[in-house]
Amino acid sequence: MSKPKLLVARRLFPELLEPLRAHYELDLHNSDTALEPAALRARLQGCWGMLGSGSERVDAELLAACPALRAVALITVGYNNLDVPACRARGLQLSHAPGVLTETTAEFGLSLLLATARRVGEGERYVRAGHWQGWSIDQFAGAPVCGTVLGIVGMGRIGGVIARRAALGLDMQVRYFNRQPVADCEFAQWRPLPELLAEADHLMVVVPYSAATHHLIGAAELAQMKPSATLINIARGGVVDDRALAAALRAGRLAAAGLDVFEGEPAVAPELLACENALLTPHIASSTLPTRQAMVQCAVDNLLAWARGEPGPTPIPA
Ligand code: DGY
């Protein structure tokens, strides 16, 4: 009997995919460039499943054009690229990768905070460009981090680890905004968003992207922050209005921003590229080799469970 066809929509670690070959006929899109909607639709013809990332858009239109598709396993924790209700309406099995990247992503968020507040990117560019003539009293004077107030927007797994490390490791006073206060949140106190914005010396955005969080931090919210504050986005492009942010950075209404995610990435708004006080990284918050391997393994484990007729270990929540 022929095996169900599985599109692997990204270049991943080939050795981790090997166990899938016993159950699936693999079609490898062995590239770091995500398939555009038309190419994805064409490539998914006759496929039973897709092993994908956060880049491949699966919506009602694609599902209608790919009626054989029964399952999508993502290597990412975020799944805003899936129209989950449309997938469910067609009975697709769906999985993502929660848990395995929590510590790594939290660690990167704090790295980006420290580097942004202390102007590491600017200083590094300055030295590398050969501009450095010697030590001076206020050169690249940054903002303090230890002992200051950290505001976290989104108190999920990653937000929780950032809160604990910031409180215990950096003596920060941690506040957070979530639609609902989280029970037993040991290291952070809930605040309504306007209060959080006004109180934070540093704001860390970790909330998942959805229609409800689109431009959650826009011009009006940025205007409520301290001009000395920094803003860090490790969530998703689109949660922060990048152009409004660039305007605030240019006008000195915000001291600095550290961004790992961008609206329409990999494109980055030219206004942001022009801001010296923006530290920009290419969506690498989860990128350590062990974590990226664990993310792939998580998708593989779900696909192997589905092949055995069992529920996968990490379904996308109902
Ligand atoms: C995720 O898992 O959603 C991350 O953004 C991928 O790095």
Image (cartoon, helix red, strand yellow):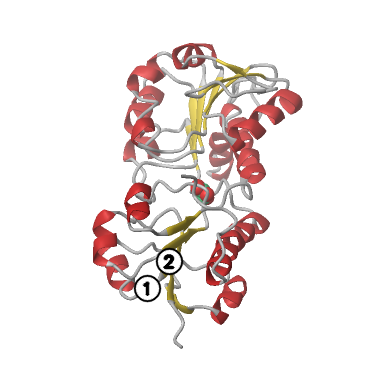
Residue at the right extreme of this rendering: 168
Marks 2/1: CA–CA distance:
7 Å
Marks 2/1 in contact by CB < 8 Å: the verdict is: yes
Residue 101, numbered label: none
Does residue 6 appear to the left or right of 121 in the view shown?
A: left
- Residue type, label 2: Met
Residue 26 position within the rendered picture, expressed as x and y whole percent measured from the top left = 47, 78
Mark 1 falls on what kind of element?
loop
The residue to which callout 1 is attached is 47
The answer to whether residue 226 is above or below residue 153 is: above
Q: Which residue is mark 2?
A: 50
Residue drawn at x 53%, y 12% is 199
Does residue 283 appear in this view?
no
Can you see residue 246? yes
Nearer to the camera, 237 or 139: 237
Give coordinates of residue 203: x percent, y percent: 53, 24
Q: Image height check: is 124 above or below 220?
A: below
Q: Is the distance from the Cβ of mark 2 to the nearest ligand 1 atom less than 8 Å?
A: no
The location of residue 123, given as percent across then percent down, is: 58, 35
Q: Name the one closer to the observer, 271 or 223.
A: 223
Quadrant in which residue 297 is drawn: bottom right
Q: Residues within 10 Å of mark 1 (few under 14, many from 20)?
A: many
